[in-house]
Every structure is written in C-alpha cells, then in structure tokens.
Image (spheres, grey):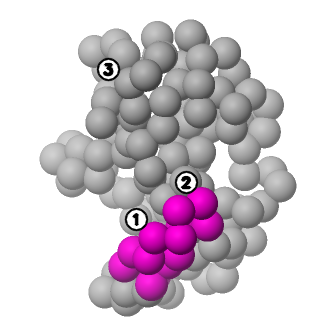
Amino acid sequence: METRFYIDFDWWRETGQDLRTMLVQLCEEYGGPDAASISPDAMVDWVDPQTAEVRRVDGLMYVVLSRCSQHEEFITERTALVEAIFRALLASGNRPLTPLELAQRVGRPPEVILRTLSGRQVYKGIRPY
C-alpha cells in the first residue's frame, strides 16, 4: 500500500499512443477551451495547489490541470477504474500517489487499485514510482 504510482509519459511515446490527442478529447469533454488549438510548444508556469511548487508544463497540460480536472464530472463513480486513476494522477499534476491516496480520489477500495496497477499489464502508462 506504500507503493506510489505515476503516469510514465515516456510509455506513451514508446507504445506509439498519442497522449496529446487523448488529453485534447478529455479537455474538450470537461469544459476546456479549444484544446486542439494549443501549441505543443507553449509552456506555462503551474503552481501545485498542495505543495506550492512551481513547474513548467505545456499549455495543454496547464488547461487540464487548471480547468478540466476541476469539473465536477471529471471523476465519478461511473468512471472506469483505470480511467479514474489516470484522471486522478493528471489532476494531481502527476505527483506519485499511493493506492490509499488514489482510493480517496476515485472512491474505490485501495486493494483493488493496488491489484489492478501491480499486474504485468501497464494501463495508460501508470507505473510504480
């Protein structure tokens, strides 16, 4: 239960999956601006609301963090488990979280979260930290 998990963005590149397209769709679904028009080169300072750490993130990730993840329907009990975990990690600024911390955010048992993420299959780039 002490293992922390995060989204390995390199996994997306290595598997040939398009994280940017997925984030654009997610953001457009949850109240972001025309996310597809945000340049991949645009960088923005983002302040982590929990740690006050300032980090440089691309413009699309900034919109996900500051607007889309704040939408009340971003994570619900109807959101599939892996998708809910992925969204919780995005909303945390990809700060590594334990199954207990994830359980609080997604409303699922931490044992189920740990079992899901500890298998051989890597879902949406979510790996142990």
Q: CA distance from mark 1 to mark 3?
A: 22 Å
Q: Are marks 1 and 2 in contact (CB under 8 Å)?
A: no
Identify the mark at residue 92; answer none if there is no mark. Answer: 2
Q: Which callout, 2 or 3, points to the residue nearer the camera?
A: 2
Please name the residue that numbered disc 3 is placed on. 121
Q: Would residue 81 be visible to someone looking at this image?
A: no
Q: Earlier in the sequence, mark 1 or mark 3?
A: 1
Residue drawn at (38%, 24%) of the image: 3
**Residue 108 appears left or right of 102:** right
Residue drawn at (49%, 59%) of the image: 93
Please name the residue that numbered disc 1 is placed on. 20
> Where is residue 97 shown, x and y percent of the image?
48, 38
Task: Say which element carries label 1.
Answer: helix
Look at the picture and state if 117 lies above or below 92. above
Residue drawn at (16%, 47%) of the image: 14
Task: Say which element carries label 2.
Answer: loop
Asked whether 54 falls inside the magenta stretch, the response is yes
Task: Identify the magenta region.
Answer: 45-59
Residue drawn at (53%, 71%) of the image: 52
> Where is residue 82 shown, x and y percent of the image?
54, 30
Q: Earlier in the sequence, mark 1 or mark 2?
A: 1
Q: Amino acid at mark 3?
A: Gln
Q: Amino acid at mark 2?
A: Ser
Task: Say which element carries label 3.
Answer: loop
Asked whether 57 falls inside the magenta stretch, the response is yes
